[in-house]
Amino acid sequence: MKTEYLLPCACGETIVVDRSQAGLTARCRCGADIAIPTLRGLEQLQRYTPTDEKTPSVWGPRQATFFLGGLIAGLALVAMVGLWLTRPVFPQDKVASIMANEEKSVANIEQLSLLETFELWEREKNGGDTSPSPERIALFAKFQQEVITYVPRMTLAMAAAVVGVLILGVALLLPKTPKPRRPLA
């Protein structure tokens, strides 16, 4: 550990110097050049004892804005991924199986009674029965309800991500916080 000394200036400031600077000159904040004494002269100066207290890191508006923007954007992205993974999927397989069961009843026309065959013929003659079965209607209603709740949530998450990115952009425009300087004495 090197020994440091306090070298006084005529302006009242003090400069911290060490033994390796003996015989050189140092410049004060006021602009004056001060001759640093030799090793024997340094021993007569007051010793500098640095305080062990570390200066707390300064968290200025720029860092706080970066943190806020990053937090909002990050949480929004996590929400968007979660929503995407749990998005409503059209129940194509269930609808296909219901439609296949409906077609099976028509495929077994030989097992239908004469009245049922006549009703089937009338229905097909008039363009077929286009009305979906109650099971298909229930599946579509459930899917539609899931979509109605999904879309606003995803829109909100996207809007939050955009707000977070905008806050990050604003943080870039804020001035940097100057780093604290080591005191001369």
Image (cartoon, rainbow, N blue to C red):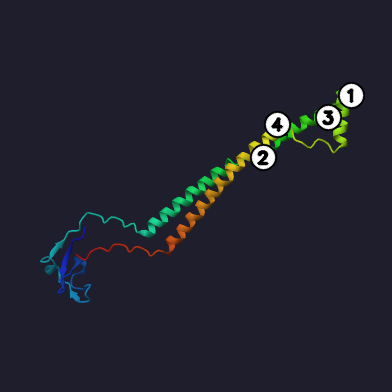
Residue that label 2 marks: 90
Separation of marks 4 and 3 at Cα, in angstroms: 18 Å
Q: Is residue 134 depicted above or below 1 in this figure?
A: above
Instruction: Decide which of 30, 38 is in the foreground and name it.
Output: 30
Check contact, mark 2 vs mark 3: CB within 8 A.
no
Residue that label 1 marks: 114
Label annotation for residue 73: none
Q: In the figure, residue 24 lies in which quadrant? A: bottom left
Q: Position of residue 101 (x, y in %)?
A: 77, 29
The numbered mark, 2 or 1, whose residue comes first in the sequence reads 2
Q: Is residue 104 depicted above or below 71 in this figure?
A: above
Which numbered mark, 2 or 4, is in the foreground of this view?
4
Q: Is label 2 in a helix, a strand or a loop?
A: loop
Callout 2 amino acid: Phe
Q: Is label 1 in a helix, a strand or a loop?
A: helix
**Which quadrant does the N terminus fall into?**
bottom left
Residue that label 3 marks: 106
Q: In the figure, residue 27 lies in which quadrant? A: bottom left
Residue that label 4 marks: 135
